[in-house]
Amino acid sequence: MEAKELDFNGFKMNGFFALFLHLIVLSAVIVFGFVAGVDSEFFSVPLMLLSMVLCVLWLVMYAGYMQLEPNEARAMVFFGKYKGTFKETGFFWVNPFLDKKKLSLRARNLDVEPIKVNDKIGNPILIGLVLVWKLKDTYKAMFEIDSQTMAASASGGQGNSNQVNIGNAVAGRMNAFENFVKIQSDAALRQVAGQYAYDDNEADAEELTLRSGGEEINEQLEQKLNERLAMAGMEVVEARINYLAYAPEIAAVMLRRQQASAIITAREKIVEGAVSMVKMALHKLSEEEVVELDEDKKAAMVSNLLVVLCADEAAQPVVNAGTLNH
């Protein structure tokens, strides 16, 4: 059976009521200790022992307090055995011998720096993404990956108080999770980018590309990330490609290629329009009987009109003052 997150069903007490009991124990320690110190009769020894026991109890009770804010959780571990995850917000007192590992369930952003990958055609490109992720299964996050060792090394030696140590442990633990997400996001990004060409200049016009894919590419990236992070109890809320460009070594060449493609497309439109205009001119001249042209003069006229209409610069016409039959 697959291990998964469980709700904590162990003993818990309202923290303020426990604090009231804590004060009663402290008062009993003081009273019994004072009575045992001033009374020399036989029962002073039992009172002293009872005072010492209550003093130890008073000290042990300190470890049972905990408080949780919204979207926080505690993984409860009793001498190495997982007892469940505590998610109820408020101030509580639980078994002091439970190890209460604090986790954040809040959404976190991760901006992955652009990495160099090869697209489907083999061109090197730079691609980056931004994603939103959060913990979904605290058991897998804590015990399926080695996050605790990384967290301990990240936060070791910082702070002296218990509260500071807890804060450092949580920060180190979440940083370890974020590092895991970053590495897996790099792998997923390489996998998705390698399945598609950069743009449709390098592939079939109907084929999905990284530039034109949009939401479909983002959805595939999110799916791949969730597949990789499921083992760590993490969930990707949203993933989007936020940077896409050719690698520097081929960027200039690809820019010239795009410019050439744009020029060819523009030329096709110009020639198509010019041919249409020449056809219309010949038709109008013939229909309205402005002038009669033989085939040679039609060919010369077509050539001249195409030169004028398709030239990059304004043509300089030469006026023929003679007759058409000359």
Image (cartoon, rainbow, N blue to C red):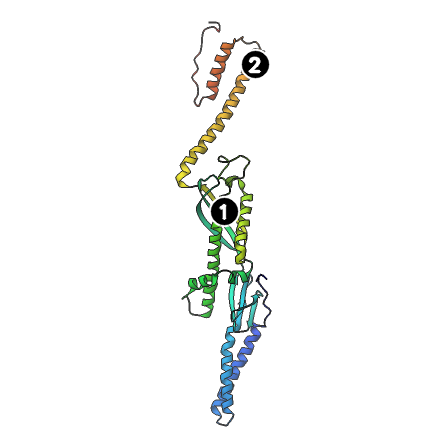
> Farthest bottom residue?
41
Is there a contact, CB below 8 Å, between mark 2 and mark 1?
Answer: no
Q: Quadrant of the N terminus?
A: bottom right
Q: Indicate whether 214 appears above or below 27.
A: above
| Circle nearer the viewer, 2 or 1 | 1
Residue 236 higher or lower than 318, as above or below: below
x, y (%) of residue 140?
A: 53, 60
Residue 133 in the image: state x and y as whole percent: 52, 54
Can residue 99 be seen here? The reply is yes
Residue at which label 1 appears:
191
Give whichever of 91, 245 is nearer the camera: 245
Number of numbered discs on residues:
2
The alpha-carbon separation of the residues under discs 2 and 1 comes to: 61 Å
Instruction: Identify the residue at the far front of this view.
Output: 1
Residue at (53, 81) in percent of width and height = 25
Neighbor class of circle 1 (other Cα within 10 Å; few <14, some 14-19, many 20+) is some
Element assignment for label 2: helix
* Residue 98 pos. (x, y %): 53, 71
Measured as percent of width and height from the top left, residue 217 is found at: 54, 44
Q: Is residue 180 above or below residue 273?
A: below
Q: Is residue 200 above or below residue 13?
A: above
Outermost residue toward the top in this view: 326
The residue singled out by tag 2 in the image is: 284
Mark 1 lies on a secondary structure that is helix
- Three-letter amino acid code of the residue under disc 1: Gln
Q: Residue at x 49, y 27 (%)?
A: 266
Mark closest to the chain's N terminus, 2 or 1: 1
Check disc 2 and give the amino acid type.
Lys
Residue 234 in view here: no
Which residue is pictured at 50% across the width and 77% down the height? 60
